[in-house]
Amino acid sequence: MRKVLSTILCLAVVLAVAYYASAESAGDQLLSEVSATYDELFPVICDPAYDQIWLDNCAAVMGQDMAPIVTAMLQSACTGTIYGQEAIDAYGDGSNGAQFDCYFINGVSQFVFDGNTISGLDEKGEQVFSHVYTCAGEFSIAGMMDGYLYETADEDAGEFKYFLLMPDTPATTWHIEFRYGSDKDALAEYASGAYAYWLAAGIQADRTEDTINNVISLFCLENLDYTEHMEGALEQLKELGFMGQWTADLSAYGDMFAGVELSMTIDENGHGITLMNGEQTRDFEAYAVDNGEQGDGVGLYVAFDNAEQETEAAPYTMETNDKGQTVLTFYADDGVISWVKTNE
C-alpha cells in the first residue's frame, strides 16, 4: 500500500529469499512487531478533526458530491456498539447489512503488548489483567480472516484466556486488529457465537499525525468500489487534466535508467496503462481530486491496479514548466517522480 513510485516505475528489483518458519515462530515474530501501547482506533480516526482526510480519499474515487455520504457509511460500518447475541438478533447473518463493533471490551481502555506479555488497563490506568502468552499456531475467523492464536497458561485469565492477532502491524498498516476471549471456538466465528460482529482495532498511543493520516487513507481506499468510475469522479479527473499521454522524467535516477522510456496513458474513461520501452507493464484505473485551494494544482491521486487488485495513493502537483509543458508530479513515501504531458 502507498508504494506509488515503485509501482509506477515498475523498475524495482525483487530479491526472492526463501524463508521457512513454523507458525509458532511467525506468531512470536508478530508479537514482537506489535509491541506497543494501544488506544481504540475508531474514536481517534473518527474525530471530526480528521474529517477532511476521509473526505479527500472518498472524493478522489467516488466524486466530491458522494464523499460525505461514503465517509459516513465507512465510519458507521466499524463503529457498532453491540456484539454477540445482541448483534445476531439485530443483524442475523448480515445479508441485509450490519455494523461491526471494533471497540475494546471487558473493561479495557488501553492494551499493552510487550513481547509475550499482554496487559490491559482500565480508563483510570489501573491494570485489568496481565498474562504471558504462547503462540498456539495459525487461526482463522470463519475462513475469512487469518491470523495467529495465543494462549495463556494462567487459570484465572477468564475472558483474556485467548488472543487472536491479525497480521496487521504499526509498520505495515499503522494499526492492529485482534480478538480475545475464553472460548476458542467462538473466536473462530464471524456472525455467530459470543463474539459475533466484534473485532477490536487499536492504534498506538504515541501515534503521529502521519500515522492517523495513513490509516484513514488505508481504510478508505481498501473499502471503496473500483468496479466502475462514478460520473463525478470521472468528470473531476477530466477537469484536472489527467487524461492524455505522459512521459516520465527519469533524469533524476542517473545511469540506472539510461535508455529507459516510461510512458503512461489515461483515456477518457479513466483507464490507464504504463509502457516501458514500448511494452505494457501496468493496467490501472486512475482517480484524482483537487484537495488544496481550488485550482492550485495540488491534490490527491489514486490508482487501482487491475491485475493486483490493489490501491495506491499519493499527493500530486500539476504545473506548467518554462517550456509551456504540463508537468504532473507524484510525491510518495519512497520517492518522487514527474511526468510530462506529450499530447498537448
Image (cartoon, rainbow, N blue to C red):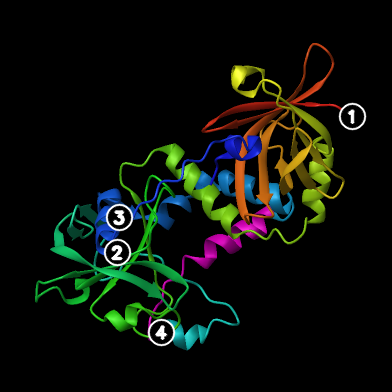
Real-space Cα distance between discs 2 and 1?
Answer: 53 Å
Element under disc 2: helix
The residue depicted at 81 percent of the width and 39 percent of the height is 265
Task: Residue 60 in the image: state x and y as whole percent.
Answer: 69, 46
Real-space Cα distance between discs 4 and 3?
Answer: 32 Å
Above or below 124: residue 51: above
Question: Marks 2 and 4: CB-CB under 8 Å?
Answer: no
Q: Residues within 10 Å of mark 1 (few under 14, many from 20)?
A: few
Image quadrant where residue 225 sits? bottom right
Q: Which residue is mark 4?
A: 86
Query: Mark 1: which amino acid?
Result: Asn
Real-space Cα distance between discs 3 and 2?
Answer: 10 Å
Real-space Cα distance between discs 1 and 4?
Answer: 60 Å
Element under disc 4: helix
Query: Mark 3: which amino acid?
Result: Leu
Tell me if I can see residue 88 in this picture.
Answer: yes
Q: Residues within 10 Å of mark 4 (few under 14, many from 20)?
A: some
Question: Marks 1 and 4: CB-CB under 8 Å?
Answer: no
Real-space Cα distance between discs 1 and 3?
Answer: 49 Å
Q: Which mark is residue 23?
A: 2
The residue depicted at 58 percent of the width and 44 percent of the height is 52
Q: Which stretch appears magenta?
A: 67-85
Task: Residue 72 in the image: state x and y as whole percent.
Answer: 59, 60
Q: Which residue is mark 1?
A: 343
Q: Which residue is mark 3?
A: 30
Q: How many marks?
A: 4
Q: Nearer the viewer, residue 17 or 5?
A: 17
Q: Nearer the viewer, residue 266 or 43?
A: 266
Task: Residue 45 in the image: state x and y as whole percent.
Answer: 46, 51
Real-space Cα distance between discs 2 and 4?
Answer: 34 Å
